[in-house]
């Protein structure tokens, strides 16, 4: 009973940390202002269309994908899927508020470095959910389920999803830029690279 309780607490803490990392990465990317990552471009479109904060747009996006993952990709769904999604939106709003005035004075090279840092934190945190087997985020749950059923590599599916999210986000009013192109090219490979290695043992023990 103690072991189950311990693992449950570890799962909750790791998932929350991953959610904070995802939100912090997105917040840095937004404040870099050279084009958001692909998911954030879509969420930016929701933000524009529904007149809600970035964090609220993130929570709405995650809620829809969590429901879809629960119905169609339960093998990849877990407590981490829900916990990280609940935390991410608040972490986005907090990071945007805390770092916005500082990053606003940066020149383009500085903004590019902030974007790259945000992209690395974002991809690492997504990979953390996968690698520690906490339950993937909603999008990755759906993509891994599609990979298993269709035999198409995760990287290709991720590129396709990133492109679709970017186009839909731009049509809804989201802002894309050079950072978006970097994100489309690097997000899938970075997640794949970060999640390599020992899985459950390195995260839960």
Image: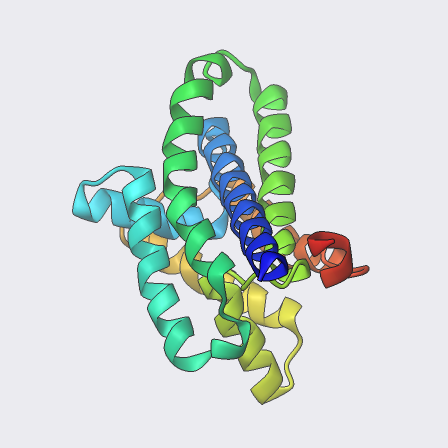
What colour scheme governs how the chains and residues are painted in the rendered image of this protein? rainbow
Pinpoint residue 109: horizontal percent, then vertical percent.
63, 22
| For residue 29, side relative to residue 133 (left or right) | left
Residue, x 40% and y 74% (percent of image)? 70
Number of numbered tags placed on the structure image: 0
Task: Name the side, left or right, on which 111 lies relative to 166.
Answer: right
Residue 155 in picture, x, y percent from top left: 65, 67
Give residue 13's position: percent from left, percent from top: 55, 45
Q: Nearer the viewer, residue 6 or 134?
A: 6
Q: Looking at the rendering, which quadrant does residue 62 occupy?
A: bottom left
Whether residue 173 is visible:
no
User: Relative to 58, is 32 above or below?
Assistant: above
Residue under the point 59% across and 50% down: 10
Residue 184 in percent (x, y) is at: 57, 54
- Along the horizontal axis of the image, is 45 left or right of 189? left
Question: Could you tell me which residue is drawn at 61 percent across and 84 percent down?
Answer: 148
From the viewer's side, name the closer residue of 170 and 141.
Answer: 141
Q: Is residue 103 visible?
A: yes
- Nearer the observer, 62 or 171: 62
Specify the quadrant of the image occupied by residue 166.
bottom left
Q: Residue furthest left?
A: 50
Query: Which residue does the image show at 50% across and 57% down from the upper left?
Result: 80
Quarter of the rendering occupied by the N terminus: bottom right
Is residue 69 found left or right of 21 in the rendered image?
left
């Amino acid at each position: 009973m103690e072991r189950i309780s311990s693992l449950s607490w570890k799962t909750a803490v790791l998932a929350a940390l991953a959610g904070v990392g995802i939100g912090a990465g997105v917040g840095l990317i937004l404040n870099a202002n050279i084009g958001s990552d692909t998911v954030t471009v879509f969420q930016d479109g929701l933000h524009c269309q529904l007149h809600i904060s970035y964090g609220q747009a993130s929570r709405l996006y995650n809620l829809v994908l969590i429901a879809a993952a629960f119905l169609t990709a339960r093998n990849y769904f877990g407590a981490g899927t829900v916990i990280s999604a609940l935390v991410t939106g608040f972490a986005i709003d907090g990071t945007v508020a805390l770092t916005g005035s500082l990053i606003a004075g940066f020149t383009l090279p500085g903004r590019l470095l902030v974007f790259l840092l945000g992209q690395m934190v974002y991809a690492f945190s997504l990979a953390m959910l996968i690698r520690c087997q906490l339950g993937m985020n909603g999008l990755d749950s759906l993509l891994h389920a599609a990979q298993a059923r269709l035999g198409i590599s995760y990287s290709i599916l991720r590129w396709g999803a990133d492109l679709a999210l970017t186009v839909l986000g731009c049509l809804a009013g989201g802002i894309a830029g050079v950072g978006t192109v970097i994100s489309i090219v690097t997000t899938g490979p970075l997640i794949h690279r970060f999640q390599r290695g020992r899985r459950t043992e390195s995260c839960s023990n």
